[in-house]
Image: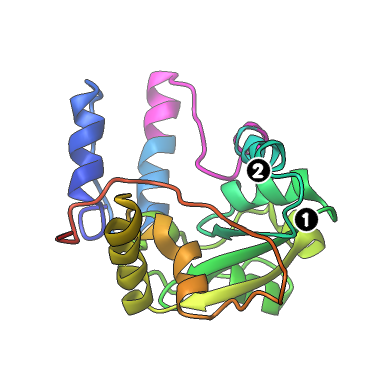
Amino acid sequence: MPTVASPAKIERIRGYGAHLVVTGDRYADALAASEQWAAESGAMPVHAYEQVETLLGQGTVGLEFEEQNPQLDSVLVACGGGGLIGGIAAWCGSRTKVVGAEPEAAPTLFMALEAGHPVDAPAGGIAADSLAPRSVGQIMFPIAQAHISRVALVTDEAIVAAQQALWNVLRIVVEPGGAAAFAAVLSRRYQAQPGERVGVLLCGANTTAVNFT
């Protein structure tokens, strides 16, 4: 996806020795190219979110949250295609409230929940390289309807502010999509109730877009 792909991600993938083809303007274009390559080469396809094994693997993050703090009331997770938050929500069930965070410029799960089914959504903004698929996955959507409390939308400015705050205070470098959940808290798009114990998932450090100081 030449128009949105993070240079840091491209460099890291190629640094591992992979043959990487960057094509198309949206995740769906890259997915189509990968599916064509798998069909032609016999390579094993691994979907970023529309695959049971992907949800199972990412659901282990919910287990880690519970092991680290069994008393959590809520967990905030960034949403893209829904593999990560879908797996976590499936694990947590009704035990822990799961809240999604999405950029206003790519409200994929937010629009799907409003419509009652996955729909094509805008795919722009600073986090488009990781949080802007054409639509959420069909596999995760029933899980989202059953176990995701709500989705908080955040601005690009809030995401940048969250990245900067994480660096200034904790010296943690997080890519825009990975900072979306914290942005929801920092910008008060998600406001915890008094005494509520909230876990915030930071995911992804592939960024060169922000000059941390």
Query: What x and y, as percent, mark residue 27?
Result: 39, 54
| Residue 125 seen anywhere in this rendered image of the structure | no
User: Label 2: how many residues lie within 10 Å, few (<14), some (14-19) or many (20+)?
Assistant: some
Q: Which residues are magenta?
A: 36-56
Identify residue for label 2.
65
In the picture, the disc for residue 96 is: 1
Q: Determine the residue positioned at 33% across, 49% down.
A: 172
52 w.r.t. 1: above or below: above
- Image location (x, y in percent) of residue 169: 33, 59
- The image's mark for residue 13 is none
Q: Position of residue 187 (x, y in %)?
A: 46, 79
Residue at the outermost right position: 94
| Up-down relation of residue 17 to residue 45 (above or below) | above
At label 1, which amino acid type do we have? Thr
Q: Residue at x 20, y 54 (%)?
A: 2
- Left or right placement of residue 182 versus residue 9 in this view: right
The answer for how far apart the CA atoms under marks 2 and 1 are is: 10 Å
Q: Does residue 17 appear in the picture of this structure? A: yes
Q: Earlier in the sequence, mark 2 or mark 1?
A: 2
Q: Quick one: quadrant of the C terminus?
A: bottom left
The magenta stretch spans residue 41: yes
Q: Residue drawn 66% across and 50% down?
A: 86
169 in the magenta segment: no
Q: Element at badge 1? A: loop
